[in-house]
């Protein structure tokens, strides 16, 4: 409805008044207060993610990773190999490494203390030339066929030691300070940098038509020690023998063993009669839906199982208004009920203009027109006390109109 007001000339005019006394700005502010903590929380999370993304170090932080530029990484060696024409393929899953390591490639296995027995067997069966760097005793024995094993810990040589073998990579590397810790068990193994007690740094052998080279100390791969003595030459000769190098840095959480061969099509494992049964089931389901589906028709009046007293319904709605602090809606409901009651008592139609309603009430009660307009079409109350006072005054006005 519209609230009647007076113009400077004394005539009644109508001004729009909302039912709950709110405006677009007040509603926007109320909604903002309701969701601002959620918005601020999301903004804080986004800011934290942005800070973490900016502060995240470039590349990897995994030891011996070819993308890791930190001292324990191997980015320097991988970049030099790439400039020499070697295609370096970094993998973290054993299954991917076995798939990629075919004949004519080199498979590098960095220190991997968490491999499963099945994964060790899969690496031992790879067709590529294998280079083991810092392998544990289980992987070392499996790949070399029990021809090389680890020896108890020994102190590193005080001075660089000559290779003492004819392995091309060792001859190119020359004197080395790598940590010894390998022992040859079979006669087909060539050891380099061996001391008098049989400890060696490198062991090489031919097995199943491929070469297997084990280096006990993986320091030749690290960025901080790759330039020590002949480490760089040894690493480049071992890993650059083929144009393709598969660099395995095992993920401790990896438990896969099977290779990534293409899975059979789902239809190939189903029986021949499955398609016929499936279409028959679809047809039966459609028939059941058409048979038992709800058919929309005309509205049918249904008696309520429980009759709720009007006083109880009124009190419930009032409690809802009070809990929501919706004094404007409550006042609008009270005023609408009063306007309808007095209009019906005075013989006015429901579509009667507010000005006519006010004039009729003024004639019936003798009240001031401004007071009547303020009661029936005024602004919403400011607090609960004002709402109670408004209800009392509306009841008084309605009783005066109904007075004979």
Image (cartoon, rainbow, N blue to C red):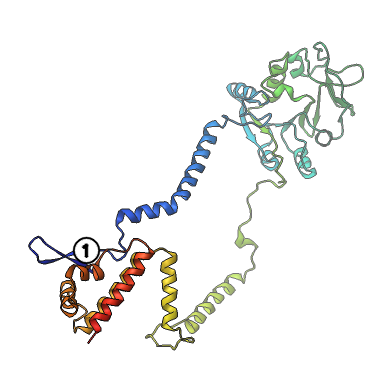
| Residue 298 pos. (x, y %) | 37, 86
- 401 or 196, which is in the foreground? 401
Residue that lies at the very extreme toward the left in this rendered image: 9
Whether residue 153 is visible here, answered yes or no, is yes
Q: Identify the residue at image location x=35%, y=67%.
A: 387
Q: Is residue 393 above or below residue 236?
A: below
Q: Is residue 88 left or right of residue 27?
A: right
Q: Nearer the viewer, residue 61 or 371?
A: 371
Q: Position of residue 342 (x, y in %)?
A: 24, 80
- Nearer to us in this view, 59 or 261: 59
Q: Residue at x 63, y 56 (%)?
A: 264
In the picture, the quarter occupied by the N terminus is: bottom left
As displayed, is residue 358 above or below residue 308?
above
* Rendering quarter of residue 211: top right
Query: Disc count in the image?
Result: 1
Left or right of 192 in this view: 76: left
Q: Within 10 angstroms of label 1, few (less than 14), some, or many (20 or more) residues?
A: few
Q: Horizontal and vertical percent for residue 64?
A: 68, 29
For the point 45% across and 65% down, the residue is 323
Residue ID for mark 1: 16
């Amino acid at each position: 409805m519209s609230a009647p007001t007076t113009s400077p000339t004394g005539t009644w005019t109508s001004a729009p008044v909302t039912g709950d006394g709110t405006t677009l700005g007040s509603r926007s502010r109320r909604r903002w207060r309701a969701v601002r903590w959620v918005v601020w929380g999301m903004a804080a999370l986004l800011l934290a993610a942005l800070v973490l993304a900016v502060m995240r170090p470039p590349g990897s932080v995994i030891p011996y990773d070819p993308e890791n530029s930190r001292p324990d990484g191997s980015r320097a060696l991988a970049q030099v190999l790439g400039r020499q024409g070697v295609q370096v393929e970094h993998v973290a899953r054993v299954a991917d490494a076995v798939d990629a390591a075919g004949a004519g490639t080199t498979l590098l296995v960095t220190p991997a203390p968490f491999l499963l027995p099945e994964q060790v067997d899969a690496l031992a069966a790879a067709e590529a030339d294998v280079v083991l760097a810092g392998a544990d005793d289980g992987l070392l024995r499996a790949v070399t066929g029990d021809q090389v094993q680890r020896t108890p810990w020994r102190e590193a040589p005080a001075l660089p030691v000559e290779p003492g073998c004819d392995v091309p990579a060792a001859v190119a590397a020359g004197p080395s300070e790598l940590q010894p810790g390998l022992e040859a068990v079979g006669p087909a193994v060539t050891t380099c940098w061996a001391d008098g007690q049989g400890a060696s740094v490198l062991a090489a052998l031919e097995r199943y038509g491929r070469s297997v080279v084990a280096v006990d100390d993986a320091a030749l791969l690290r960025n901080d020690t790759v330039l020590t003595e002949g480490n760089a030459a040894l690493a480049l000769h071992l890993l650059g023998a083929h144009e393709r190098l598969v660099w395995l840095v095992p993920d401790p959480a990896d438990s896969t063993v099977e290779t990534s061969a293409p899975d059979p099509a789902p239809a190939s494992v189903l029986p021949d009669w499955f398609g016929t049964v499936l279409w028959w089931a679809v047809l039966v389901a459609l028939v059941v839906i058409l048979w038992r589906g709800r058919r929309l028709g005309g509205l049918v009046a249904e008696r309520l199982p429980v009759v709720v007293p009007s006083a109880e319904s009124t009190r419930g709605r009032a409690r809802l208004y009070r809990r929501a602090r919706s004094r404007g809606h409550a006042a609008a409901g009270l005023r609408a009920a009063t306007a309808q009651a007095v209009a019906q008592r005075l013989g006015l139609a429901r579509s009667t203009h507010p000005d006519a309603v006010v004039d009729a009430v003024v004639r019936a009660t003798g009240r001031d027109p401004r007071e009547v307009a303020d009661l029936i079409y005024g602004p919403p109350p400011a607090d609960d006390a004002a709402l109670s006072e408004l209800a009392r005054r509306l009841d008084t006005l309605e009783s005066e109109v109904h007075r004979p």
